[in-house]
Image (cartoon, rainbow, N blue to C red):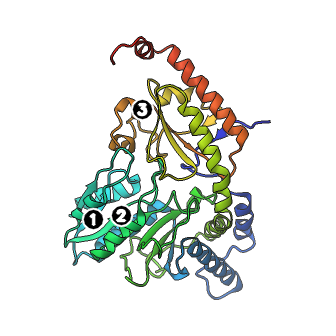
């Protein structure tokens, strides 16, 4: 029996894998020590658990454990990385390069720094959601200290040419940071092969708990230093003070370990389902795919159903299918997606978009149900739409 609602909003958050929950549970009750308490066995056990998780996170992205700083999530990690670089490298310059389609954590942090005197270049994207690499290189000045471009977009799943971006950054001696929140655990990410200096990730996007994330900070070639944004007891090598969330960190570590082991198998299972969903829905008249077709995360699909408002469409099935019309961080807003607008979509098409995020627990039966439900909902809404009727009558809209 199909359980409702069908969950296809895995880009917003993922359910905690039962194996992650099982790994975390002892650290709430039996092994409850503070990882900074070095004078008794409960503290030692907690510290050991944190050290183990640090290794698991590092292994997923090809880093060393000493390069991993634990945070409360990717948003905090982004703030620490960008503000930390800006404050540390202020004698070198004040120029940051990013893109208009970044996650709000990056955009709002850069806007905050603009008020502090930072110069920020906002790169545009093409209709597929990709930046122009020659524009990136042309934007670099002697004052440029950081390029911050995401690994993969949270709304469209479009994957940036990370290695090519890194090559440009290295050539000009500029640090390269990537928000890998959507990519880590879903596709292979390697900080050395990819030439990344700073990387952010979050547990709850890869079947771990909410409220836990990590920041990778390169230790050699080049050695990156950051100014702390939270002051206190000097935890996390002075970069992030605060008592560590041991259960959450254990959960993040276990989630990373499972992704390492199962990423290839998950992709092999999810990609055909995503493609089948996409193919079936694109057969609905006046439906369009948003984002570079061949350069996307295997579990993500963003479609626009012309002449239908996504909010109205979702009202027809939101008790049956959990979906979103864009980023969870901006879905409370009635504005059309800024990511889709930056890609050149009209307000109408941007308002008519749905994001499908499949995951480890998505089934073929759920995809069949989704195809049928959404096809019916679009058809039904269009039958009562005067604009659709005018389109069908050949009126130039």
Question: Measured along the vertical axis of the image, is residue 278 above or below residue 234?
Answer: above
Q: x and y percent of residue 295 in the render?
A: 47, 53
Task: Examine the rendering and report whether any part of residue 341 can be seen.
Answer: yes
- Secondary element at image label 3: helix
Residue ID for mark 2: 148
Task: Examine the rendering and report whether any part of residue 16 can be seen.
Answer: no
Residue ID for mark 3: 351
Mark 2, Cα crowd under 10 Å, few <14 / some 14-19 / many 20+, is many
Name which residue lies at 58% across and 72% down.
Answer: 57
Q: CA distance from mark 2 to mark 3?
A: 28 Å
In this view, the residue in front, 189 or 334, is 189
In this view, the residue in front, 106 or 295, is 295
Q: x and y percent of residue 6 in the render?
A: 67, 39
Q: Quadrant of residue 131?
A: bottom left
The earlier-in-sequence mark between 2 and 3 is: 2
Residue ID for mark 1: 96
């Amino acid at each position: 029996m199909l359980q409702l609602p069908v969950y296809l909003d895995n880009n917003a958050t993922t359910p905690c894998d039962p194996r992650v929950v099982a790994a975390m549970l002892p650290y709430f009750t039996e092994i409850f020590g503070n990882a900074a308490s070095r004078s008794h066995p409960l503290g030692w056990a907690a510290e050991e658990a944190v050290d183990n998780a640090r290794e698991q996170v590092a292994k997923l992205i090809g880093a060393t454990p000493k390069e991993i700083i634990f945070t409360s999530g990717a948003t905090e990690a982004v703030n620490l990385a960008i503000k930390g670089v800006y404050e540390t490298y202020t004698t070198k310059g004040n120029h940051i390069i990013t893109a208009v389609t970044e996650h709000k954590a990056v955009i709002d942090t850069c806007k905050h720094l603009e008020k502090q005197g930072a110069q920020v270049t906002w790169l545009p994207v093409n209709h597929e959601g990709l930046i122009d690499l020659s524009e990136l290189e042309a934007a670099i000045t002697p004052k440029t200290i950081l390029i911050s471009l995401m690994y993969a977009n949270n709304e469209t799943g479009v994957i940036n040419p990370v290695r090519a971006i890194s090559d440009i950054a290295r050539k000009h001696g500029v640090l390269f940071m990537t928000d890998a929140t959507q990519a880590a655990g879903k596709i292979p990410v390697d900080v050395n092969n990819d030439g990344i200096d700073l990387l952010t990730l979050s547990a709850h996007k890869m079947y771990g708990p909410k409220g836990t994330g990590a920041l990778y900070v390169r230790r050699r070639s080049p050695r990156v230093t950051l100014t702390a944004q939270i002051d206190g007891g000097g935890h996390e090598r002075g970069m992030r003070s605060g008592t560590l969330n041991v259960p959450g960190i254990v959960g993040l570590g276990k989630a990373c370990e499972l992704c390492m082991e199962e990423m290839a198998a998950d992709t092999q299972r999810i990609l055909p389902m995503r493609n089948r969903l996409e193919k079936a829905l694109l057969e609905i008249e006046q439906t369009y795919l948003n984002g570079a077709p061949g350069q996307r995360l295997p579990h993500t699909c963003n479609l626009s159903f012309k002449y239908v408002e996504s909010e109205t469409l979702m009202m027809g099935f939101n008790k049956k299918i959990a979906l979103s019309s864009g980023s969870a961080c901006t879905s409370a807003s009635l504005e059309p997606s800024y990511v889709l607008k930056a890609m050149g979509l009209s307000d109408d098409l941007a308002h008519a978009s749905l994001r499908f995020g499949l995951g480890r627990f998505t089934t073929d039966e759920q995809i069949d149900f989704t195809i049928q439900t959404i096809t019916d909902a679009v058809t039904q809404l269009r039958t009562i739409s005067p604009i659709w009727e005018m389109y069908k009558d050949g009126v130039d809209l």
